[in-house]
Image (cartoon, grey):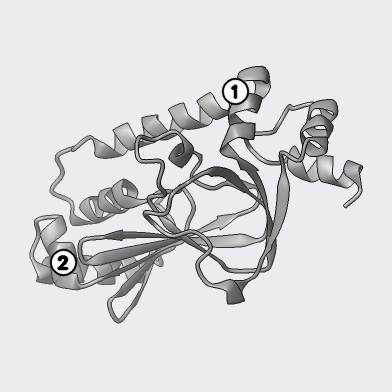
């Protein structure tokens, strides 16, 4: 890839926006970046619990992010440009919390932990981008963890989805039994079923056997 095209692609990535061409070129010359091609036939490219020893960024294509809980699975799409769970580099266990597989052909930009740490210490723009992203994620996690009392079943369902989601992307596909969903929001199975049918009529969700696709949040 010509360096000009490489620079344009790289600086669309959230963590590298604002970083100069000279700094990107310097990192490239040092072999700090590697480009890895991905395709759907590969299956899982990152698994939950896997050790994280590199910063992974999605330059092109789309991934499925899969989160698993007790008796439920949530699938969310991630589209380029994006950063893949950068907090896994810094958390105590240094492991991924989610599983990822390619939805389309694409390319990843990866940098090992040592190069990422050096870049973090010597590049203020990169450091600010990282801190901004991580603080925003912490803020969203805090807001979603706050239990706001409500008797509205639709609100309960949507608050649960926001709490278990990793991304802010829609749609989201939840694999769950109705009885499990009812238990999670402390409602009866009948009331949950009625509410989901109403949400389907309002074109907020699509219902199939043990799957609920949430198309968007209500305006």
Can you identify the residue that label 2 sits on? 180
Give whichever of 88, 173 is nearer the camera.
88
Q: In the image, what residue occupies the spot 43% across and 49% down?
A: 51
Local packing at callout 1 (Cα closer than 10 Å; few below 14, some 14-19, many 20+) is some
C-alpha separation, residue under disc 1 versus residue under disc 2: 42 Å
Give the percent coordinates (x, y) of residue 205.
37, 67
Q: Secondary structure at mark 1?
A: helix
Q: Which mark is residue 136?
A: none
Vertical placement of residue 92 versus 165, above or below = above
Local packing at callout 2 (Cα closer than 10 Å; few below 14, some 14-19, many 20+) is some
Give whichever of 177, 127 is nearer the camera.
127
Q: In the image, what residue occupies the spot 63% across and 37% down?
A: 14
How many numbered marks have been drawn onto this rendered protein structure?
A: 2
Can you identify the residue that label 1 sits on? 127
Q: Quadrant of residue 26?
A: top right
Q: Quadrant of residue 72?
A: bottom left
Q: Is residue 152 left or right of residue 65?
A: left
Please report whichever mark, 1 or 2, sits nearer to the chain's N-terminal start: 1
């Amino acid at each position: 890839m010509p360096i000009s095209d490489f620079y344009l692609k790289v600086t669309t990535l959230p963590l590298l926006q604002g970083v100069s061409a000279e700094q990107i070129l310097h990192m490239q010359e040092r072999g700090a970046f590697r480009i890895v091609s991905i395709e759907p036939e590969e299956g899982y490219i990152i698994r939950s619990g896997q050790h994280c020893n590199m910063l992974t960024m999605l330059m092109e294509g789309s991934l499925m992010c899969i989160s698993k809980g007790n008796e439920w699975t949530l699938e969310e799409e991630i589209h380029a440009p994006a950063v893949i769970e950068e907090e896994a580099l810094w958390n105590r266990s240094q492991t991924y919390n989610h599983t990822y597989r390619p939805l389309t052909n694409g390319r990843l930009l990866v940098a090992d932990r040592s190069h990422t740490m050096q870049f973090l210490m010597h590049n203020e723009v990169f450091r600010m981008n990282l801190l901004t992203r991580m603080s925003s994620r912490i803020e969203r996690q805090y807001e979603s963890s706050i239990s706001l009392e409500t008797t509205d079943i639709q609100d309960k369902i949507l608050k649960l989805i926001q709490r278990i989601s990793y991304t802010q992307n829609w749609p989201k596909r939840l694999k769950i039994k109705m009885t499990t969903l009812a238990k999670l929001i402390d409602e009866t199975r009948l009331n949950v079923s009625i509410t989901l049918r109403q949400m389907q009529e309002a074109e907020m969700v699509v219902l199939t056997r043990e799957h609920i696709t949430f198309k968007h949040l209500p305006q």
